[in-house]
Amino acid sequence: MPDDSLFVCCKHRARTSQPRVALGDIVKAGELLARIHNIDRTATELHEYFANRDGMIIIKYVPTIINIGDNLNVIDEIVC
């Protein structure tokens, strides 16, 4: 049964997303998925988002501007 580890959601408001993976990529838990930059203030700390589980990227956030609660990625289990 799917659980919350499938979803990687943004926890920061009004940021620009720099994706590090593509749709269909196979990822491992802990792998870097995206870097999020503050669009209101330059030279501030960026935030990195990592995979919660092993699997395949089945949904990828495409727009550049991201807000709290937006899904960056959905990672699903690979079943053979």
Image: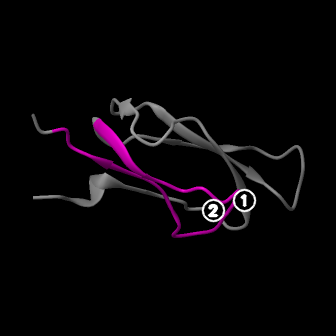
Which residue in the structure is indicated by mark 1? Answer: 15
- In front: 8, or 45? 8
Residue at mark 2: 12
Residue at image point 30% right, 53% down: 6
> Could you tell whether 41 is left or right of 58 in the image?
right
Give the answer, above or below, for where 12 lies relative to 35.
below
Q: Is residue 66 left or right of residue 60?
A: right
Q: Where 39 falls versus 76 (above or below)?
A: below
Residue displayed at 44% across by 30% down:
31
Which amino acid type is shown beneath numbered disc 2?
A: His
Q: Is residue 34 left or right of residue 53?
A: right
Secondary element under disc 2, as helix, strand or loop, is loop
Residue 49 vs 40, above or below: the answer is above
The residue range painted magenta reads 55-78
Q: Which mark is residue 61?
A: none
Q: Name the residue at the right extreme.
A: 42
Badge 2: few (under 14), some or many (20 or more) residues near its Cα, within 10 Å?
some
Q: Disc 1 marks which amino acid?
A: Arg
